[in-house]
Image: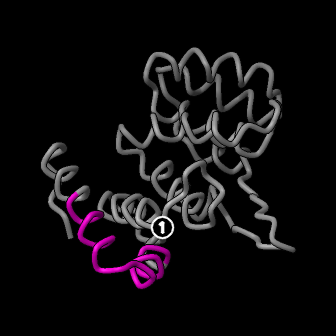
């Protein structure tokens, strides 16, 4: 999932470049009656104006996938002015609904210091949650981030993870 959508994070001359192909993101999605089929079609045709209109409507009604798509559009500047804080806000809304793709991307953004108020502990917590929800490809980032944290940061993050697990009744690894 995440690796297919957030293929690779490139570091080049202190700039973080994202290659998050929206075509790949949507081409693997099953048809849905919730409007995401139209969103997929617009993205596959690179009709970002239509994708933005459909995505905003779906996202404002709580569709986690549409929130994720809008987040990636704003982070990359695909069809919209690049707006990392705005993109992160959409990704956070999607992550609050336990979207493992949004959790994984937020982990990357925090790990590399791209997200506003980036923190390594946030990167670890997001990666851990994504892994707990079945996103196995994030495990390397989760382990790397964990190895860079202090004991106090690990304790603070572990408390957040434990509260999240209780709230969502998720058995944690």
Q: Which residue is at the front of the view, 142 or 99? A: 142
Residue at x 55% of width, y 34% of height = 90
- To which residue does mark 1 refer? 120
Residue under the image location 62 percent in, 38 percent down:
71
Q: Is residue 1 visible?
A: no
Q: Is residue 19 above or below residue 22?
A: below
Q: Quadrant of residue 52?
A: top right
User: Does residue 151 appear to the left or right of 89 in the view shown?
Assistant: left
Q: What residue appears at the point 70 percent right and 44 percent down from the top-left corner?
A: 75
Residue 147 in percent (x, y) is at 41, 85
Picture colour scheme:
one colour
In the rendered image, residue 100 lying in the magenta stretch gets the answer no
User: Overall secondary structure of the magenta stretch?
Assistant: helix
Instruction: Tell me, yes or no, whether the highlighted magenta stretch contains residue 154.
Output: yes
Q: Which residues are magenta?
A: 141-159
Quadrant in which residue 45 is drawn? top right
**Which residue ends up furthest to the right in the rendered image?**
13
- Residue 114 visible in image: yes
Q: Position of residue 165 (x, y in %)?
A: 18, 53
Horizontal side of 20 relative to 122 (left or right) equals: right
Quadrant housing the C terminus: bottom left
Expressed as whole percent of the image width and height from the top left, the position of residue 57 reads 57, 14
Is 171 left, or right, of 125 in this rendering?
left
* Residue 95 position within the rendered picture, expressed as x and y whole percent measured from the top left: 42, 43
Q: How many marks?
A: 1
Decide which of 59, 159 is in the foreground and name it: 159
Q: Secondary structure at mark 1?
A: helix
Relative vertical location of residue 68 with respect to residue 37 in this rendering, above or below: below
Q: Residue furthest front?
A: 152
Dot 1 alpha-carbon crowd within 10 angstroms: few under 14, some 14 to 19, many 20 or more: many
């Amino acid at each position: 999932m995440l690796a297919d959508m957030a293929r690779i994070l490139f570091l080049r001359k202190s700039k973080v470049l994202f290659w998050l192909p929206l075509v790949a993101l949507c081409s693997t999605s099953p048809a849905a009656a919730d409007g995401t089929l139209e969103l997929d079609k617009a993205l596959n045709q690179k009709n970002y104006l239509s994708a933005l209109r459909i995505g905003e409507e779906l996202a404002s009604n709580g569709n986690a996938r549409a929130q994720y798509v809008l987040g990636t559009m704003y982070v990359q500047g695909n069809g919209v002015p690049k707006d990392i804080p705005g993109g992160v806000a959409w990704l956070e809304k999607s992550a609050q609904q336990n979207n493992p793709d949004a959790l994984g991307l937020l982990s990357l953004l925090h790990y590399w210091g791209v997200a506003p108020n980036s923190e390594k502990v946030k990167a670890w917590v997001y990666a851990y949650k994504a892994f707990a929800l079945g996103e196995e490809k994030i495990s390397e980032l989760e382990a790397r981030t964990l190895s860079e944290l202090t004991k106090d940061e690990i304790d603070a993050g572990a408390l957040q993870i434990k509260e999240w697990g209780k709230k969502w009744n998720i058995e944690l690894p």
